[in-house]
Image (cartoon, grey):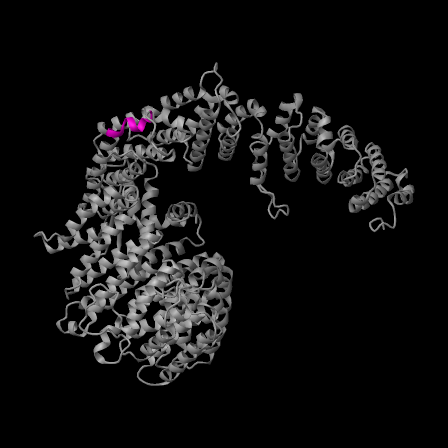
Amino acid sequence: VSPQVDDAQSTVSVEFTPTIPHCSMATLIGLSIKVKLLRSLPERFKLDVHITPGTHASEHAVNKQLADKERVAAALENSHLLEVVNQCLSARS
Amino acid sequence: GVKDGRWTVLQLVEALGFCLENTDARMRGRGIQLLSQVLLQCYSLLQEKEVLHLVLFYESRLQDNHLVIPSVLQGLRALSMCEVLPPGLAVSVLKAIFQEVHVQSLLQLDRHTVYSIITNFMSTREEELKGLGANFTFGFIQVMDGEKDPRNLLVAFQIVHDLIAKDYALGPFVEELFEVTSCYFPVDFTPPPNDPHGIQREDLILSLRAVLASTTQFAEFLLPLLIEKLDSELQSAKLDSLQTLTACCAIYGQKELQEFLPSLWSSLRREVFQTASEKIETECLVALRALSACLSRSVLSSDSEDLLDSFLSSILQDCRHHLCEPDMKLVWPSAKLLQAAAGASLRTYHCITHSVLPLLLEQYTKHMQSSQRRTILEMLLGFLELQQKWGHVEEDESPLLLHQAPVCSVVFSALLDPSVQLQLVGIKALTVLGSLQGFLSSSNLELVVDHLIRLALHEEDSQSSEAAMEAAGSLAPTYPKDFSGHMVPRLEKELQSEREESYHKRHSLQQRCLQALAAVSTHTTIVKETVPILLQHLQKVQKGTEAKNTQDVISVCQSLHRVALQCQQDAEGCWYFHQTVVPCLLAMAVQAAMPESTHTLPGKALLEEEVLAAMIPVISAATTHLSPELAAQSVAHVVPLFLDGDVSFLPQNSFPCSFQPFGDGEHLETQRRLVALLMAFVCSLPRDVPIPQQEWLLRELLALSCSSNCPFTATTAAKCFAGLVNKHPAGQQLDEILQLAVNRMEPSLAEGPRRTQALTLLLWVTKALVLRYHPLSSCLTDKLLGLLDDTELGPATADGFSLLMAESPDVLHKGCHADVRIMFRQRFFTDNVPKLVQGFHGAGPDVKANYLKGLSHVLNHLPKPVLVTELPTLLSLLLEALSCSDRVVQLSTLSCLHPLLLEAPQIMSLHVDTLVTKFLNLTSSPTMAVRIAALRCAHALTSLPTTVLLPYKGRVIRALAKPLDDKKRLVRKEAVAARGEWFLLGSPGR
């Protein structure tokens, strides 16, 4: 995972690399990163979470999903998905 | 009636006759129940004859209706406790029970009665029962077969254990006995919630293990069972099997183990290689060590082959090749297995290291990367540490000695490696090698010292340098000659060298030299060389006047302090240090404080407050561990120096002017500062050392503390006075001097230019008395409480409460033999907090803060468990304190509330509304520390019940967005943690 932060421009860009090109968790990982950032950063920041180019089979599809605010919001409405994301972010094991 | 002898049992039986012979089983049961109850109360009064008849009666009743049986058993239990039971009856009772009663169809309580009868007989009639032979064992097996209740099982296991331990005849029933107990292995039992009997899983496990591991006769059945359970999937079963195996190894020998060794080893190996659980790995290693120890303990009969050799060779065969691949996963498990086996006995150690040591040395040279070398060296270190366990390396066959040269060269090459991690392991290995007596030859030792000096002085990385100094310190006592002969002169030379390098470089080198000199001073002969060097260096640097000289002086003092701490335990070294250092420091200070020298200004560095403060711990540490006689000798010099100006014992004692620290006059101001050194000395003396002219000294100190204009001098004098008062034996003299002190303080406290000094004195004296529970302390504390109302002194007084409660670094603590009662803080709390609260409610608005501050200081120093129990009563006050504008109050209140939030969430949830509002307000405080503390508390709020918090969730999350953008990183960090936790509140997957 490699982040790039521009405080003056208020942008944060995170690039992450899934373990294997067919990693089925890529969307979930991306979503978790995104949610954690949403919760931890001041509102002024614009977020961009995407997969390192060339490391995942369905790179574009995942990136598109992650960039779509509506879809991220909808995902978090889904209580099952929210549970999984929260489990990823919870400090307790 | 029977109890006080008015009735005999015979009469009772006759009276009950109708009942006992009634044809209705229920009536009979009632009658027998009554009789049994009576017997239980007075079995000790029975006559032998009565017992005989009763027993016969009860035995016959065993054949009776099942309704009657429970009472019959109760009666038999009573009789089994009789001391006068005629011989032979125990056997017949048991026979009858075994024959007539089907125990497992009884209720739990009645089964328990049967077990008690057996236990009672076993403890009193051992011989008779043994006469029964294996029949008794068989009978018991039948009784116990199928038992389910954990309460009964505990008793039953105890009986089996006694059967085995007391050598009852088991006859052909060994396997049955094993079956009847081992069927419970591994114990799987979860006590029901709110179980009144308090039997834990662990109790059952331990008592069953005691049974199973109690005899070698079980081995042939138990070992296969253990292996089977070890191969199962269940973690707890594996753990239990491993621990049982370890327990068995304590009594087993070769014969029992022989057949199962290969499968045991393969199971253990598999677990260590594959398991993810650290606990199982540890237990496996323990079991392996126990196995190897067991094998090496067995005495060999001449014809059998040595199992140990074949066992170890199979271990070596399976693990050895893994050691050659330091990057692979199995390296460490293999090394640990080998080390566990090697740690079992000297024989196993020889056998294993004989094969592994050359291999590791060879691998070290083969692999070039530092990370690989580090792994190999760490494994080597593990084996070296085991050698330490076996002590000296004297025997010729020791494999370590055979490979002495290559081991040394490997370790030395690690020390030269640029990787810090490898260096650190190398230094550790060096320490271990050094502690093996006779391993390092003198030429090697020289090399060791060279390496250590190089690492300590010139290594860039401070971690390595510190580790090297530590190593030097721990090796020095073993080889004092080598270190004092090589290392100390080298360090001295480096310390004094004025080579033309940048100032900065030379400075840091000198610092390292000073630290190294201190670190290596762990043996008296070395101390005797390093101390003069340090003192000489001190002489040299104190002459300058610049700020950096002050720093230098301070670092010399720190080194001296370290030396002092290291030689405290050794009487000779301690006295040497005291005798050399204390006069020398005093002489330098006195010299510097002479009026003439202040004109020309050299020596001024020595009188800086920070320098004096650095000298205090040196003198204090040099004094606390003196024996009373030597301390008395020393005190006879030091006190006259200050009181009479008697300089005769100081080295270079020709001073141009007299030394009168307690004299009058402006020009003596600098001399007065040296009271700090007097304080360091007299306040650290053991309590039983008498101080000459103590009354006079106390008076002078008192006067000085009230009259001096210099805050440093006044405070030090007050501390010194307090330190002496604390140790002063109770009595009229003490009361007089205290009265004198109070009389001096009162007028200065009331008005005048020296109110602060008087307050300082009051605080220190109060502390001295509070610590020793002196009756006057409450009066002085009340005076302090009164001062909280004072607009001028109030804030300082409030801060003073922290001084009263905190541990002070230089005087009045346990280390310098002060009279400190345990729980003085709790006592102070119960005595004074109500008064503080009362005062707060009665105080004017401008001084309310003082009370809160005082209170929060007291609470802050209270042990946390006490705090949690006491706080609920003070909660409303604390909540009010949060609105106080003083940031010290805010901070300490927040730190009081934090543990309370975590530990008493129920009480706190009553105030959740106030808490949320106040915490959120404080997150925008101008003080960073307050913001951090408030955010931590906001985080801790999440441990309250979720239902209470949910209404606030949105508000808190919105409010916490602001500190996310705080300009301080530490604040942002806390904000992120707190906000993340609030997001998780009440949402799924938390």
Residue B201 falls inside the magenta stretch: no
Residue B111 falls left or right of residue B200 = right
Q: Nearer the viewer, residue B725 or A1?
A: B725
Q: Is residue B399 above or below residue B687?
A: above
Find residue B646 and report its image quarter.
bottom left
View extreme (left): residue: B500
User: What residue lies at 37% left-to-right and 74% top-to-bottom?
Assistant: B698
Residue B12 falls left or right of residue B804 = right
User: What residue lies at 44% left-to-right and 76% top-to-bottom?
Assistant: B780
Q: Position of residue B747 (x, y in %)?
A: 38, 85
View extreme (front): residue: B648
Q: Is residue B965 above or below residue B783?
A: above
View extreme (top): residue: B303
Give the main secondary structure of the magenta stretch.
Answer: helix
Q: Position of residue B238 (x, y in %)?
A: 49, 32
Q: Position of residue B353 (x, y in %)?
A: 34, 27
Residue B901 falls left or right of residue B655 = right
Find residue B220 and report its image quarter.
top right
Q: Nearer the viewer, residue B83 or B328?
A: B83
Determine if residue B856 is in view: no
In the image, the segment drawn in magenta is B397-406
Q: Is residue B434 above or below residue B575?
A: above
